[in-house]
Structures are given as structure tokens and as C-alpha cells.
Image (cartoon, rainbow, N blue to C red):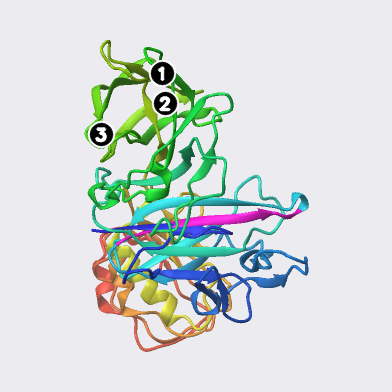
Amino acid sequence: MIPFSFLAGALVFFSVGAADALSGYQINCGAKSEKLVGGVKWVPDVPFIHVGNVSELPSPGMVPTLASLRYFPDTSAKKYCYVVPAQKAASAVDTAASYAKGLATYFEAVVAATGREVSICLARNAATGSRSPFISALEVVPLEDSVYRATNFTAYALSAIARHSFGDNGSIVSYPGDRFNRYWEPYDGGRMQAVESQMTVDTEAFWNKPPQAVFRRGLTACPGEKLELQWPPTPLPAATYYLALYFQENRAAGSSRVFDVAVNGQTFFVGLNVSTAGSMVYAAEWPLSGQTTITLTPAANSPVGPVINAAEIMMVVPLGGRTHPRDVIGMEALAKGFANPPSDWIGDPCLPVGNSWTGVTCSHDPLARVTALNLTNFRLGGSISDDIANLTAVSSIWLVGNNLSGPIPDMSSLHHLQFLHLEDNALIGPLPESLGSLPRLQEL
């Protein structure tokens, strides 16, 4: 199973299908035509979404991927989803722009695709109010098997917090330096001593495939002294994190540095021997809260101080609430059978929790089940799919006051069904005899 990277808003993740090429999908939301930015082709978002309005921002000099957006004023919908074909898994970044300050914000996640498609949704919450969620750009990129492979992607996703290149005061390292277009921001360390290396690191030897550029500079301390680094720069909410630290000896080949690594005073790695080939130490699940301090303590006989070149940290996010595959099949078939289903009937029916499809009630199980369906007076056309029989946990179905046609499908598998209301439609044929054998059916 390959993780995918998602990038929405202004940033993007890519994976390499061929040398020097980005794969996956680079989507310029709201754009009318293809744009070539930094050698990367960005395509309009029309093939991937069918709701929302588009707008262009006529600001001179604006990055093309921020010059248009798609926004979602429909307050009757709970969420608005892009659906992108999947290969094996994907990571994505979501960027929403802060236009008042001329800035942009991005969000990055690494998840594993479990089916043929990946849905990336903007969902309303209490803070949204009557305002319109929006998105400027979206990238979905397949990663290589080894990247972040210590994470159990069947149960968790990763949400990027920070990724820095230490001792660097230049520009952000991204594609083509980073084959997945991950963003490594410069972190000069202020008054801390910076070092530069002329030795090339073979990053193919690293699971996470960091770019060579982040090993060219680093932060160090004087011989015999500790190196203390408050990183990431902002306090962290109490959670579990994936933390990876990268090191390289900057002196001649054959030399090395030995030091211990601690995070908030807790031992992270003892006796790390860093060579010119580079090293990575990581923790797949490390609890953190508040301000974080990384301490590098040199060995007693080390002739030089410790060094650190780069780091990345991601929150480990539980994936509870995903819809049971059986129910996904049933609900997607219903959506295709209805001539005009609600606009948010796309993506996972029950995710995110509290933002299920309109008219759909879900359980709170690790794999959510559809427990009720109420689309009374929704002006639905079309027919009721036979695959409604997959909704084996449903207890209530209300489809009253629509314009549904065709026969009533077999529902003999719906043993939890208590209420079935299909009146005021254009359905034809007799009621299936199997309805009489449903043990819990009370109203028909």
C-alpha cells in the first residue's frame, strides 16, 4: 500500500513516475485553462468536482495557482469534495489563501487510498458560519513504498506540522529538489553556528527520500557543548507525532561525530555516530505537547560539537469514522440511481464525523454504518438502486414526496429496518413479499 500526499491551496506534493517528472494530479482550482508553473503543468479542476463557484483574483504578480479559486456558498451542503483517481495510496496538501495579507496557507496530509478513488473534502464546522469555504489549488501525489512506512496507514493518517532545513537562510526547497515537492522551509537558527558541507549525500538510502539540498548546511555547537534547538518554532497541541531528524558530517570522508539526541529531556537516540553518508533517526509515535526542545549532547571524546541538518514532524491522526465498504457500495449506487441527489453526495458518505451526506445518519463505529436515510421532499428523480440491500444496518428509510420511478427493490437483507416510507412517488409494481418477513419492520 503506497501512501499519497495531498496538497490543497497553494502547495503541492508529487511523486516521480519517470526521472525529473512529477506524477499524480496538480489541480488549479477555479482556473479556466492549463498553467505551466516551474515546469509543472496545473490543470483546471472541472473534471474532479461538480459543485461550487469559481472566482479570479486580478492581483498583479500573483502566483498562477493562487490567482483563481473555487468557493462553496451552498450552506445546505455539509461538505464539498474533490474526487481523484487513486493508484495505491496518496498524500495531499491543502492551501487556502490569506489574501488580505498577501499570504497563503497550506495543509498537507499523508494517507493511504483504500479504493479506486481518493476524495478530498472541505467540510463546514461551527466556525464556518455563513461564510464560504474555498480552495486555490490541490495536489494528490503517490509516494514511494518506503516513505513514512513506519506508520500504520490502515488506522492513521499523517498531518504535516513543520519541515525545515537548518542553517539555511535561502529559499524553500521543493520540486525539483524534492521529488515529491514537499516544502522544506529555511531555518537559519539566529545566532547559532552554521556549517556547510561539500559532501554529496545519497538520499536514495533514506526511507523518506529527503532532498540533497537540506544536507548542504546545518547547525552546530562548539566542541564539548550541547546544541539546544527549540523546534518546531510554535507550541504543539497534545498529541502523538511522527518525528524525523536528519544529520550529516560536514568534514572529510571518514570523519564522524558522536552525540546523544533528546527531545524534551527524554532520550531519543544514544550514541548517534554521524558520518558523511548522513543519518536519520525517527519515532513513528512520539507524544509531545507545548514547546519542544531538541538537545544534542556530544560524546565525552568527540572532537567536534553535534550537528543537525533538517527535520520534519507530522501529527499522527486516527482514521475512525470511515464508512464500511458494503455501505459505500450501496450509497454510491443510490447516488447514481437518483437523477438529482444532494450536491454533497460524493466522497465517503460518513466522513468527516458530523458531516455525513445530507439526509444520511451514520453510526460511530470504527467502520461507520449507515443507520438512517431521510430524503423526504427532496425532489429526487430516477430510481431506487437494487444495491440499497447493502445497507444492512439501516433502521429507517424515508423517501416520501419525490418523483422516484421504477420497481421497489428487494430489501430482504435489511434485518434492522423498522421504518420504510416510499409514498408519494411514481414507483410501480407490487410491494416485495420479502418485506413481510423483516423481523423489525413497524411502519410501511
Query: For mark 1, what is the residue?
Result: 264
Q: Magenta residues, as a range?
A: 89-99
Front tag of 3 and 2: 3
How many dots with numbers? Answer: 3
Q: State whether residue 192 appears in this view.
A: yes
Q: Quadrant of residue 372?
A: bottom left
- Point 73% across, 55% down: residue: 99
Looking at the figure, which quarter contains the C terminus?
bottom left
Query: For mark 3, what is the residue?
Result: 275
Q: Earlier in the sequence, mark 1 or mark 2?
A: 1
Which one is in front, 323 or 160? Answer: 160
Which one is in front, 430 or 383? Answer: 383
Task: Name the element at disc 2.
Answer: strand
95 falls in the magenta region: yes
Looking at the figure, which quarter contains the N terminus?
bottom left
Q: Residues within 10 Å of mark 3 (few under 14, many from 20)?
A: some
Across and down, in percent, residue 385 comes to: 36, 79
Q: Quadrant of residue 402?
A: bottom right
Task: Name the element at disc 3.
Answer: loop
The answer to whether 225 is drawn above or below residue 411 in the figure is above
Query: For mark 2, what is the residue?
Result: 288
Across and down, in percent, residue 65 comes to: 61, 66
